[in-house]
Image: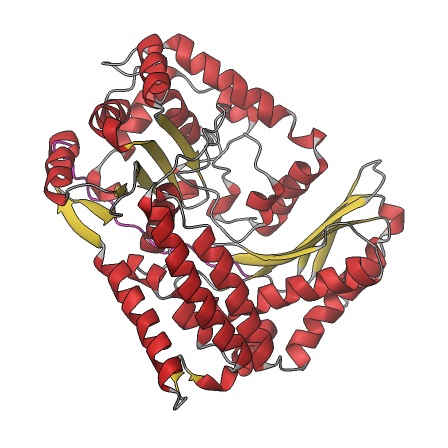
Amino acid sequence: MKKTNAMRRGGGPACSLGNSTTNRPKSQPLREGRAHQRTAKILTLLLLISSLLALSPALLTRGQAQSKSPEVARTLQNAQTLVAKQAALVSEFEVNGLKVLVKRREGSLTVAAGLFIKGGSRNITAENAGIEALMLDAATEASAAFPRDRMRDEQSRMGTVISSSENNDYSVLSLRCTRPYFDRSWQMFVDVALHPSFTKEDVALVQEKMVVSLRDDTDDPDTYLQRLQERVAYANHPYLNSVEGTAESVARLTPEDLRRYRQRVFETSRLLLVIVGDLDLAKVKALVTAGFGELPRGNYVAKPVPQLTFDKSTVDVTPRNLPTNYVQGLFTAPPPDSPDIYPMRIASSILRDRVFQEVRAKRNLSYAPDAFLRNQAANIGGIYVTAVDANQSVHLMLEEIARLQRDQVDNEDIQAVVAQYLTSYYMNQETNAAQASELAAYELLGGGWRNSVAVIEKLSAVTPADVQRVAQKYMRNIRFVVLGDPKSVDTRIFTGQ
């Protein structure tokens, strides 16, 4: 289904427990009681820390306090204690090869769970592209113990949502429910995962929706731009096999294809289960063992994803009669488990703010110029703009990249980004679904879930030299794609970095 621009160009994974790629309406987040009060206290402490960082960058050297102020030292010590406590809330165990992460949020009135399938684009081919997305989406329609009408009635009565989403690296079957209805919702979730009906009618209904959506990709300029960019950036790479598929590949899939595919990928060695809520760990272990303990283990071993390499700047222009030109340029970026990812996040944030200032605020050339950094195993970052004068807009954006590469930023700039990132990061972690997605992303791509609680510390340790180094290393050989008027594009500007 259609992704928003933020999902396509943003830094976070598209695969989320809180964002289904189905056509079903998303439910509104439920209140989580005392958990929100606790979140507010955490944010207050973190905002205090970020203010100290922004006002006094010299207080930190590689994340360690250098100030003699007892108050500052106590504040930073409290922050480290808070991080340790957050890590202590997560338990991990295995059931017949299935790794399970459980995070307890005392007082939370909701529960979120996600069964993640490793591999993403590497699981599929050009011929069956979209099969994993269709398989998971169709599975949520009905199961052996919960036919379609019963499934709809019980979900509506309990406020339970079972959905799915996917990205280049993994897919997820997700559950969101209230704590009082967790036991019944869990039964439904397990039955959907293990015993989907895949009736001819259910598969045809979901399949038709997907095909219709895929066929009109070229109607929306932003969506079409992403499709064009994927062909350029992912040539000869596994990511070229779209997890959403094409209208043609999805249309030829059958219910039997889905059954065979589900049988192949539902092995515990390919799966990760993440659960977040106020639940008793012993009870969760018993439920997981009863639900998924009989799955075959398999022998899946995740192989490293080939990193993308761009050896020169290019520009591909696709003619389209539009009132403005749509432009996106990609450069390679460090993967989420690389130490370079932290200075790269800082560099990307600074570039985004500078691009906005130069292109929109000062010259009003575009309403929404952007710089972004994605979060995938073979990672990319880039710049995006819609503008009548694409040449001037891109020239200014490349100038800002050159400035990052040429001149070191100030410590104050870095700490301002850390403060901004800290605020938005923790606000985005208020829901259990968001926390489950974050744990899974770090476990699957970011070197392990424990790195998810050390983000701010590692960002705070970034130096101006680090930012300059990653800008020089990664922000080059940009692959541009333009959708619009070829006559208005001077390709020398795009490739003259």
Residue 431 x, y percent position in the rendering: 39, 44
Task: Identify the residue shown where x is 50% and y is 25%.
Answer: 25
The part of the chain drawn in magenta is: 293-309
Q: Is residue 308 magenta?
A: yes
Vertical arrangement, residue 471 with respect to residue 422, above or below = below
36 with respect to 380 (left or right): left
In the image shown, does 298 or 467 lie closer to the viewer?
A: 467
Can you name the residue that lies furthest to the bottom here?
68
- Where does the C terminus fall, quadrant-wise? bottom right
Residue 389 x, y percent position in the rendering: 86, 53
18 with respect to 35 (left or right): right
Give the quadrant of residue 185.
top left
Q: Main secondary structure of the magenta part?
A: loop
Residue 350 x, y percent position in the rendering: 62, 68
Vertical arrangement, residue 136 with respect to residue 483, above or below = above
Vertical arrangement, residue 236 with respect to residue 201, above or below = below
390 with respect to 284 (left or right): right
Task: Identify the residue shown where x is 38% and y is 37%.
Answer: 31
Give the quadrant of residue 436.
top left
Give the quadrant of residue 114.
top left
